[in-house]
């Protein structure tokens, strides 16, 4: 019996050593906080990958069949689609047409072709400018239905709500991010998905909702990947890091601290556009002139001056504001200032991460280990 127990113990030890040999060294003897952050960033990476896939799939293909969360039979024909997006697309298409007209004019003319019975008019395929215009119009049209298609609105709300844990991570010193920066960034996004979007159908049917989600997804994918590599001791690369993995870590580090120059303005700009969607539409000139009819009769002027029309337009527009619009007014001024603060913080972080010195990844493949020694 003693020999059998001893044999079983040796077998168990051998099995554990075999399993232990396949466990990466970075996963051994770590704190509970590290294991938690590994799990959190892995989950965050998977969720934002899922959301990005949903949005890109929606922009590339036709909407899915109706579901419990998406009862609309054809979201592409939603009557609430933002008309301003079509106007902007038309203006862009006209501009492109004017630029490309010297190249495409010979192909766009109707040619007179003789036939047995007389003159036959032969038309040609659409010009490149017309094709670009049509493609942009279709893309913006689909982007305007992002919220209502494939339960993307619900998925974005739930996935972003998970970020409420990040200020707690900073407060508990699990991460090095300042609590104020983490809280401000999370609060701004939660305001967008929980209030500004949910309280405005115009925001839900805006193409800026799609651009916002794509910018958020790209930023979160880079951030989660970078943090996960840091927890696995891949960033910064060490002297024993395989060269291919070290180059990958260098690329991720560079993108993490460079892509924000594009992603943050796109994301914040889209957020700002969604905030503005909560305001009533600006009154037309005809509506303003009708409201000024009594004023014109009093002063005896049939055609009021331009400054008076502009002032009356603003006055009429403000009178149409409800409580929701007034609640948005502070954020109209806070949002640009917040973007400036966040960009300044990330710029300093970029200098710290990509500058010269020990433990930094130098763009261009000049990788250094934690001791500052240049890799061969």
Image (tube, rainbow, N blue to C red):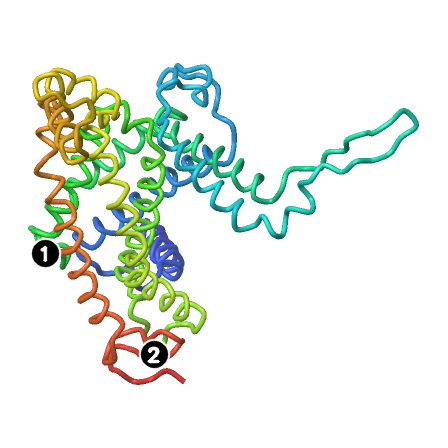
Residue sitting at 18 percent across and 28 percent down?
Answer: 279
Q: Nearer the viewer, residue 172 or 81?
A: 81
Rendered location of residue 366, percent (x, y)? 37, 79
Residue sitting at 10 percent across and 45 percent down?
Answer: 334
**Residue lying at the far front of the rendered structure:** 300
Q: Quadrant of residue 281?
A: top left
Residue occupied by mark 1: 178
Q: Nearer the viewer, residue 273 or 218?
A: 273
Q: Quadrant of residue 79?
A: top left
Please tell me whether mark 2 or mark 1 is closer to you in this view. Answer: 1
Q: Which mark is residue 272?
A: none
Q: Residues within 10 Å of mark 1 (few under 14, many from 20)?
A: few
Q: Are marks 2 and 1 in contact (CB under 8 Å)?
A: no
Q: Nearer the viewer, residue 122 or 224?
A: 122
Give the quadrant of the C terminus: bottom left
Q: Quick check: 141 above or below 21? A: above
Q: Quick check: 323 above or below 247? A: above
Q: Earlier in the sequence, mark 2 or mark 1?
A: 1
Secondary structure, mark 1, is: loop
Rendered location of residue 238, percent (x, y)? 32, 75
Q: Quadrant of residue 126?
A: top right
Q: Nearer the viewer, residue 173 or 212?
A: 212
Rendered location of residue 138, percent (x, y)? 49, 33
Residue 128 lies left or right of residue 190; in this view the side is: right
Q: Which mark is residue 239?
A: 2
Residue 47 lies left or right of residue 323; in this view the side is: right
Q: Residues within 10 Å of mark 2 (few under 14, many from 20)?
A: some
């Amino acid at each position: 019996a003693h020999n059998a127990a001893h044999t079983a113990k040796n077998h168990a030890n051998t099995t554990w050593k075999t399993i232990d040999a396949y466990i990466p060294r970075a996963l051994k003897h770590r704190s509970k906080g590290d294991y938690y952050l590994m799990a959190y960033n892995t989950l965050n990476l998977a969720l934002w990958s899922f959301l990005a896939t949903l949005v890109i799939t929606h922009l590339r293909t036709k909407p899915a069949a109706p579901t419990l969360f998406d009862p609309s039979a054809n979201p592409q024909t939603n009557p609430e689609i933002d008309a301003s997006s079509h106007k902007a697309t038309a203006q862009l298409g006209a501009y492109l047409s004017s630029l490309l007209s010297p190249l495409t004019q010979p192909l766009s003319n109707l040619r007179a072709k003789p036939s047995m019975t007389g003159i036959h008019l032969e038309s040609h395929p659409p010009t490149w400018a017309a094709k670009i215009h049509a493609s942009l119009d279709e893309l913006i049209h689909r982007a305007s239905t992002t919220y209502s298609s494939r339960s993307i609105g619900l998925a974005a709300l739930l996935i972003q709500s998970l970020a409420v844990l990040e200020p707690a991570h900073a407060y508990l010193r699990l991460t090095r991010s300042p609590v104020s920066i983490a809280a401000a960034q999370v609060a701004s996004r939660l305001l967008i998905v929980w209030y500004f979007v949910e309280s405005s159908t115009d925001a839900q049917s805006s193409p800026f909702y799609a651009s916002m989600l794509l910018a958020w997804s790209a930023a979160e994918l880079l951030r989660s990947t970078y943090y996960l590599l840091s927890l696995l001791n891949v960033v910064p690369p060490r002297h024993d890091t395989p060269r291919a993995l070290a180059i990958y870590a260098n690329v991720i580090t560079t993108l993490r601290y460079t892509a924000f120059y594009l992603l943050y303005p796109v994301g914040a700009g889209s957020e700002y556009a969604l905030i503005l969607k909560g305001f009533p539409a600006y009154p037309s000139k005809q509506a303003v002139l009708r409201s000024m009819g009594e004023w014109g009769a009093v002063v005896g002027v049939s055609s009021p001056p331009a400054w008076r029309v502009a002032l009356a337009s603003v006055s009429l527009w403000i009178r149409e504001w409800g409580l929701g619009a007034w609640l948005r007014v502070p954020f109209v001024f806070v949002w640009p200032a917040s973007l400036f603060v966040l960009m300044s913080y990330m710029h300093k972080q970029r200098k710290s991460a990509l500058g010269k010195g020990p433990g930094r990844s130098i763009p261009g493949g000049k990788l250094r280990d934690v001791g500052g020694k240049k890799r061969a």
